[in-house]
Image (cartoon, rainbow, N blue to C red):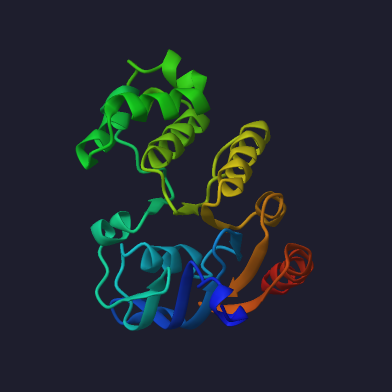
Amino acid sequence: MKAAALIQAPAIELTGVKAAYGRIEVVHGVDLSIPAGSVFALLGPNGAGKSTLLKVISARMRPTAGTVDIGGLALRRPTPAALARLGVCAIPEGRGIFPNLTVRENLMIWSFQGVASSVVEEVAYDRFPKLKERRRQMAGTLSGGEQQMLAIARALAGDPKVLLLDELSMGLAPLVVAELYDLVGQIAARGVTVVLVEQFVTTALMVATDAAIMLHGAIHATGSPAEMGQLAAAAYLSEG
């Protein structure tokens, strides 16, 4: 077998991706390659276009130009359902839970996708014992950290290959953030590709293996976490 054949395709590859809200373009021709099995941190200040780019990757928003490849497959008109079948799971900013359902009912949604309810609960409660204690509680009454745990637990029940996380740390206490990011590291160690959108550089770089800085809707730089941490600090200061 030739050495080139051993090279694994990127988990996600974007080519010339643009995106707009109405006539206002907010992502300007992004080219980005995210290695399989990596924890990829997409850094940048508010308004840089990070969350919009993640919406395009997760098919919650259609690009106005460019292509999105998942696992070497060029998807012409991807949908969230099609990506879910490929093992892509997104946790949006705001967590995306159902506040008027109980914790258990939120988890049981995965059983409609063919995952046994016993497996869903086992995965969730093994990772987050607090959720078992609160399984009959309305999800909207949980603390912010517990809601994020529920969102992650629900995602893990689907055994994802790619996990997209948008502002995981938003509104949470530092100790809770550290606990959640420790879990992200454990998830990545199982071979799941994780893409983090964060504006808090130090938090994201605790677990990142690769990183990129996004400014004004374009990729400013890519590289190692150490390199991007230094560049991000300078970039953010220049934005202020």
Q: 33 and 17: which one is in front?
A: 33
Q: Is residue 102 visible?
A: no
Q: How many marks?
A: 0
For the point 54% across and 45% down, the residue is 170
For the point 61% across and 32% down, the residue is 176
- Describe residue 116's horizontal placement relative to residue 47 as left or right: left
Instruction: Return the x and y of residue 167 as percentages of the image width and height.
Output: 52, 51
- Describe residue 180's horizontal placement relative to residue 156 as left or right: right
Q: Residue furthest front?
A: 1
Q: 98 and 74: which one is in front?
A: 74
Q: 125 and 98: which one is in front?
A: 125
Instruction: Return the x and y of residue 51 as percentages of the image width and height.
Output: 46, 62
In the image, residue 239 sits, relative to residue 37, either above or below, namely: below
In the image, residue 38 sits, relative to residue 135, either above or below, namely: below
For the point 38% across and 23% down, the residue is 141
- Describe residue 125's horizontal placement relative to residue 96 as left or right: right
Place residue 56 in its image quadrant: bottom left
Looking at the figure, which quarter contains the N terminus? bottom right
- Describe residue 114's horizontal placement relative to residue 236 as left or right: left
For the point 54% across and 64% down, the residue is 36
In the image, residue 168 sits, relative to residue 98, either above or below, namely: below
Instruction: Return the x and y of residue 142 as percentages of the image width and height.
Output: 43, 24
Q: Is residue 210 visible?
A: yes
Looking at the figure, which quarter contains the C terminus? bottom right
Instruction: Return the x and y of residue 18 as percentages of the image width and height.
Output: 40, 81
In the image, residue 179 sits, relative to residue 218, either above or below, namely: above
Place residue 218 in its image quadrant: bottom right
